[in-house]
Image: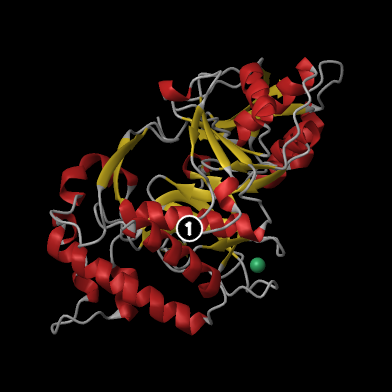
Amino acid sequence: MNQPRDLQREFYEMLMESQHWLPETMLEYQRSQLAQLLRHARANVPFYERRLDPVFTASGDIDWDRWHEIPIVKRSDLFERRHEMLAKRVPKGHGDVSTISSSGSTGLPIQVTSNRLTTIAANANRWRAHRWHGLDWSRTYTARDRLNPEADWPHGQQLGPWGPPGDAEAVAGRWFLLSRRATAEQTLEFLGRTGSSYFSSGPKTLHAMGLEAERLGVAVKLDWVMTQGEPAEEEDRRVIKRAFGANTLEHYGSKEGGQIAAPCPDGGGMHINAESILVEIIDAQGRPCPPGQPGRVIITPFVSTAQPLIRYDQGDIARLGVACRCGRCLPVLEAIEGRAMAMFTHPDGRTVARLLTDDARAALNCSFWQIAQVGPLDFEVRYVLRDQARAADEPAAASIFRSIYFSDARVRFVVRDSIPLTPAGKHIEYVNEWTTR
Ligand SMILES: [Zn+2]
């Protein structure tokens, strides 16, 4: 009985060992996973019927040297060719299929169909990150979740333990879902009442909630907050630490790719969950980027068999790092520099996807901001003042801006009361309103 839980536990236990595998062992494992995925996709998914031809030899073997010839799957494919991308059948044991919708940061609505194994992989990778950072599964964890009426304040929805099945300590853990309908004040009250040590939400929501806790004079003590869905920036982490005393654990993942990477507790980068997903960083010509060079993040999750994504452009820009000093052999992402809409262009053809640095934020004395390209050389920085009593040094911020992006950029500053969220509740910091018009 309870076979799914055993599989869940086995995979988690494997991850705790495989993080120390030598690179050649990992490569062998990845190729065996990829080979199964490719054969399944070619046989059962119309979208991939011919797309994978470059890597299949006449005898049906896989030529890994030609991997880079497989065309990149775009987000628009998920939208326009969704039905062709669904598997006519899913391999035995891969389990129940379910579909989630995402309006995403680009506003292009997509649906992603997953199966039970993708959930198992995501859980196990999350637990491994918890272990790295010393989280205690016997304590209380609250997740700010969907608009689920069962999870409305004041009761929330109580689920079982949130740690791995079979872990003796985790049995005592309590896990609550709290609906997004709860206000900041209600959420703070809930966290205090349930004695939550851990809380997960988006980094901007947590940042705003931290400021609200300070404004209301509500003292809520948390050990960690877990974030996903958008980058947690230095300013977010600083406010979260100040308001809640909490460290920020950023999971890098997506609805399409599941858990992609998690921060190393010892090194400065994020370790890729290499047992579950292949991550490639490629340049504009499609060539692999060496460590340190920013490129597009291309993912291939191994167990997404209901809707395989083989070389899918995740829409992010990141840099690979060198081997980590912590002793774990998992590959490293040194930094995730920008999201899809953060690609700014110059009339001469140059493109830049970088974050505007913290010194610009300090110069502007701002909490939230949005940086938009609004013309060929025109940019607008919309920002919310952190402290009304202090003036912003816009010329200083403009000169930092020009040093990071384009020396001839024209920058306009606009003070706002708040930065509106997208319908999906996301805060978009970098947006190109010019070339995407
Ligand atoms: Zn490490």
Q: Position of residue 346 (x, y in %)?
A: 53, 43
The colour style of the image is secondary structure
Q: Based on the displayed image, in which of its 4 quarters is residue 239 positioned?
A: top right
Q: Is residue 16 in view?
A: yes
Q: Based on the displayed image, in which of its 4 quarters is residue 267 positioned?
A: bottom right
Describe residue 116's horizontal placement relative to residue 26 as left or right.
left
Q: Position of residue 162 (x, y in %)?
A: 53, 46
Residue at position x 64%, y 29% from top?
194
Which quadrant of the rendered structure holds the C terminus?
Answer: top left
Residue that label 1 marks: 124
Residue at position x 20%, y 62% from top?
91
Q: Is residue 163 above or below residue 436?
A: below
Which quadrant of the rendered structure holds the N terminus?
Answer: bottom left
Label 1: which secondary element: helix
Q: Nearer the viewer, residue 239 or 16?
A: 16
Describe residue 301's horizontal placement relative to residue 289 as left or right.
left
Q: Is residue 412 in view?
A: no
Q: Nearer the viewer, residue 58 or 436?
A: 58
Q: Position of residue 225 (x, y in %)?
A: 65, 41
Disc 1: CA contacts within 10 A as few (<14), some (14-19) or many (>=20): many
Describe residue 193's horizontal placement relative to residue 87 as left or right.
right
